[in-house]
Image: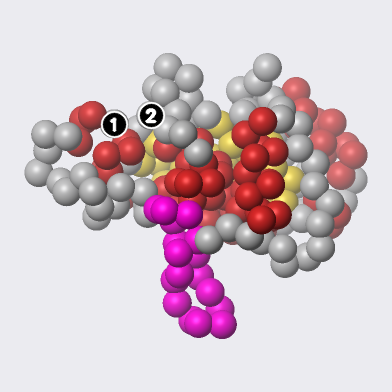
């Protein structure tokens, strides 16, 4: 029921000081971000650099995408000032998705040879498409990474989550935002 619970109990993130993956324990402000993302249709954050907002948003989006109904798939569009930056968030979401136990992916795994309490050993079990620009899941949900520009959102519709990562560095940000806004599903 709680994305905060999902993140803190199933996801791991890299801790550079320890040089290893550690359980993703959210700080109070990161919990506030998850609460805001879950309750509001428009969230704009101002924050200091290196506050973990992209990682927190990636964890939240991974949880939402994993639990999406096949009849109401979720689309997340990530726009960065460069494709590399947008891909970093896509890769974070993908890696978080691969950490979730198989039972979260639906009943189809209940009577299978897989251990449903563990994450998938083969990513093709949950992904239809998995490359540097798009990840599409078996439940129809997807995340797309694009670089900023007038055509950043071309061909992507029904967007549930529209993320501008490092928005302050996007040239002509107002124009990019204006061209991407119509892709957002009602």
Q: Label 1, label 2: how many angstroms apart (C-alpha)? A: 9 Å
Q: Which residue is mark 2?
A: 139
164 horizontally vs 57: left or right: right
| Residues tagged 1 and 2 counted as in contact (Cβ below 8 A) | yes
Relative height, residue 127 to residue 84 (above, below): above
Q: Provide the secondary structure element on which disc 2 rests.
A: loop
169 horizontally vs 92: left or right: right
Image quarter of residue 103: top left
117 horizontally vs 171: left or right: left
Q: Position of residue 1 (x, y in %)?
A: 46, 34
Q: Nearer the viewer, residue 161 or 5?
A: 5
Label drawn at residue 106: 1
Relative height, residue 17 to residue 174 (above, below): below
The answer to whether any part of residue 49 appears in the image is: yes
Q: Provide the secondary structure element on which disc 1 rests.
A: loop
**Quadrant position of the C terminus in the picture:** top right
Q: Nearer the viewer, residue 30 or 76?
A: 30
Q: Which residues are magenta?
A: 8-24
């Amino acid at each position: 029921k709680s994305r905060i619970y999902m993140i803190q109990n199933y996801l791991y993130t890299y801790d550079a000081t320890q040089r290893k993956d550690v359980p993703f324990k959210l700080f109070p402000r990161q919990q506030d971000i998850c609460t805001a993302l879950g309750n509001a249709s428009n969230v704009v954050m101002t924050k200091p650099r290196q506050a973990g907002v992209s990682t927190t948003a990636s964890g939240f989006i991974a949880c939402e995408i994993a639990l999406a109904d096949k009849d109401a798939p979720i689309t997340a569009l990530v726009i960065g000032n460069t494709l590399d930056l947008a891909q970093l968030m896509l890769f974070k979401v993908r890696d978080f998705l691969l950490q979730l136990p198989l039972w979260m992916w639906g009943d189809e795994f209940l009577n299978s040879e897989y251990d449903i309490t563990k994450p998938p050993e083969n990513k093709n079990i949950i992904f239809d498409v998995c490359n540097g620009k798009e990840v599409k899941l078996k439940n129809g949900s997807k995340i797309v990474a694009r670089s900023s520009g007038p055509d950043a959102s071309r061909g992507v519709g029904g967007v549930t989550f529209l993320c501008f990562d490092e928005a302050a560095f996007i040239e002509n940000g107002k124009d990019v935002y204006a061209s991407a806004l119509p892709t957002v599903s009602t």
